Image (cartoon, rainbow, N blue to C red):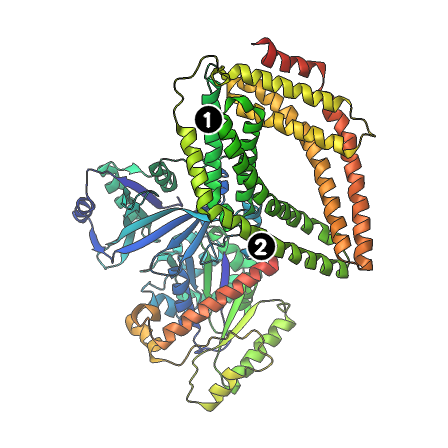
Amino acid sequence: MKIIAIYNIKGGVGKTATAVNLAYLASTDGANTLLWDLDPQGATSYYYKVKPKVKGGGKKLIEGKSDIEDAVRGTDYEDLDILPADFSYRNMDLFLDQTKKPQKRLRKLLQPFEDEYDYVFLDCPPSISSASEAVFAASDVLLVPTIPTTLSLRTYKQIRKFFHENGYAEMKILPFFAMVDRRKQMHRLIVEHPPSFMPGTLRSYIPYASEVEKMGVHRAPVGVFAGRSRAAVSYRNMWEEVKEDLHLLESELE
Amino acid sequence: MAKNQHEYILPETSSTADFIASLQSIFTIREEHEAVIWRTFYDTFDWRLFNQGASLELYKDQTSPKVYWRADKDSARKIQLGLSSVPRFIDHMPRSNLRKQLEPIQKMRELLPRIKLKIKRQPIVVLNDEGRIIVRLNVDEYWFRPAKTRAAHVLGRRVSSKAVKGYQENYDQYLDFIQQLELRTAPDNMLKLALAETGHSAGDYTTKLNLLLDTDEPLIAALKEILARLSEIIHQNTPGTIRGEDTEYLHDYRVAVRKTRSVMSEIKDALPPDIVNTYGKFFSMLGKYTGPVRDIDVYLIKLDKYQKNLSKEGKKQLKAFKLHLQELRKEKQAALKETLKSSEYKQAMKSWDEYLQQPVENLDENSPQARPVSTVADKLVWELYQQTLEQGNVITPESPADDIHTLRKTCKKLRYVMEFFQSLYPARRIRELILVLKGLQDVLGDFNDYAVHIDMLKEFRKSVPEESVEKAMTAMIKELKKKQAAVRAGFAEQYAQYSSQDHIDEFREIFVDSR
């Protein structure tokens, strides 16, 4: 089981779209995939037509008082399940802080799925908090969507700094560019020459495309309703690249 | 099968349409697009994976191809590997956990597609009132084409299902429905079913002779059976030997040729002189063509072992030597390939097989050919055993290496003959005798191997006049000589058992007294 988190402190950078599409692509590979919507806004759950609600509430789930397996819902796609969001997740930090080892909590909660799923995707809310630290500790890989603008790059720098200062220096981070508008000179420049503080940036990037926005209308991943669109192709390329990286990771661990 | 997944067999008497109709009478369903899936099972020529209970499968549907691995029969789950094709040789496999598991099973053998199944799949989803998918199922029709015909046929139809998370109750309702239809649970045996269709079982390739000879059978009939079985092994390994990459084909091919020659030379008067004359030459020619390639193969396999003791320069030289050997192998392999592909070769094998298949008729009762096989076998085994004792008894720690090699060769002849006629004797007792002989042969073989390695390293030393190599090789040769001496010291112990009075008595009882 590989845990892949999609994370950024900033909101509106394409985290949910990435989680929704990559998880879908993983499942079409025939891999058993679970997507955990950790964002109280519940957009991921919405895209997959699943009610953003956890039976018994988020608190019980995080504390381990209700069975996490009961909270999982199937989607319209074979091999893809979802752990829906719950509005109570807005208090995730609070829930976590009441457990014994908040940092290790998420990983522990996912343990029963070790043999069941090949991939678990975590769609994270935009923040830096106990919850995000639990995500970092749980994940094998962190995907960081970044818009190619000065402000977003600055945020990325902050994330890296945080990792270095808080003992996540070894963490496998894969930044990539999202919402890229090739009509804009700055976007083009940054995508073609990623700054030196972004080592390991994925070659594939996600364009700013209307298909991504239409996901809300179709309530489905791009690949389902616009399989040949630029956005769908970009996500596919990105997934291939991430898999390659995961494979490398595996051989490094040996 | 994983939790909440089920597979049932659809009886031949009811059609897919019948099943869908009865499903529809109870549930709201939607038939999805039909799909075609190919499942190809890979294994080595001698079914090493299957024999270990493992399976490696290439799965192709409309999405990208996938490779699944199951380590043993008991694993509930197949593991999907990060591969889209099956690498033929272990060296081509990326370093991974799988490689670690596969390496000791596959070793140097190539992986071949052994069984290919085509599945026509009708996916069906069961929907609830809100239009959400609550159960997924597939009706699969398995098609299979046996190797020797172009006509494919249906191997079976199955319905597999999977619960959708969050809808357990609905899934239970579906299972109740299945129960009412009284369908049988499907075992995970498509590979075995397909194999049965080919008229074979997996693991049916063996280099063991496994004959069923009859003690009263005329000698010539028994010999023909032995030779025909050896010819079968030769044929089985010919295409692989021609391809020339997986070295085990040539190995098995060569052993079968050597055994064939051994039958002709050890039991001379039983086969017609013209046959011995013609085919003796033919098989000896095959021995000559296969020998050099096999020798180089053995060299190359052993060479890698010497790498680690070498300096950087030495490693470079060894690599160069290896390249030189590989080039030489290409040359010899090309000659071998040409021989095996020639019409002369094919014609000779064909007429050899025809001769072996001619029924034994009108035998002159007094001819050597008509003797009961057991009489001849008894005598031959006993004589060869005596010969090994004569040669072995005079070996002292000071005897020249040639004496040991002579004994090794005689032991090999004895082993072949015992294996040819094994089925004439009490199974357990002859197996014990062969086992002791094998123990002795192992020591003699090790001794010989060291001699061969030493020669090889000497040759390497000679071919690269460079001081570091000279030094490294001299040191290694010294080391090997030490090991060879240790093997020689172990000889006495093995031989003592082989030549003990008890052992001689056992031989006498089986091969002399029972006459």
Q: Pick the quarter of the image with the N terminus of chain B.
A: top left
Res B476 seen here: yes
Task: Using the image, determine if residue B440 lies above or below residue A13.
Answer: above
Location of residue A4 in the rendering, given as x and y in whole percent from the top left corner: 49, 64
Residue B224: numbered disc: 1
Location of residue A82 in the rendering, given as x and y in whole percent from the top left corner: 39, 60
Q: What amino acid does circle 1 point to?
A: Lys
Kindly report the distance in space between the C-alpha atoms of the residues bearing marks 2 and 1.
35 Å
Secondary element at tag 2: helix
Location of residue B6 in the rendering, given as x and y in whole percent from the top left corner: 33, 44
Q: On the rendered structure, is B75 left or right of B316? A: left
Callout count: 2
Q: Nearer the viewer, residue A119 or B511?
A: B511
Q: Nearer the viewer, residue A214 or A66?
A: A214
Determine which quarter of the picture holds residue B392. Answer: top right
Q: Please check whether the numbered discs 2 and 1 fall on a single chain.
A: yes
- Chain holding disc 1: B
Earlier sequence position, callout 2 versus callout 1: 1
Secondary element at tag 1: helix
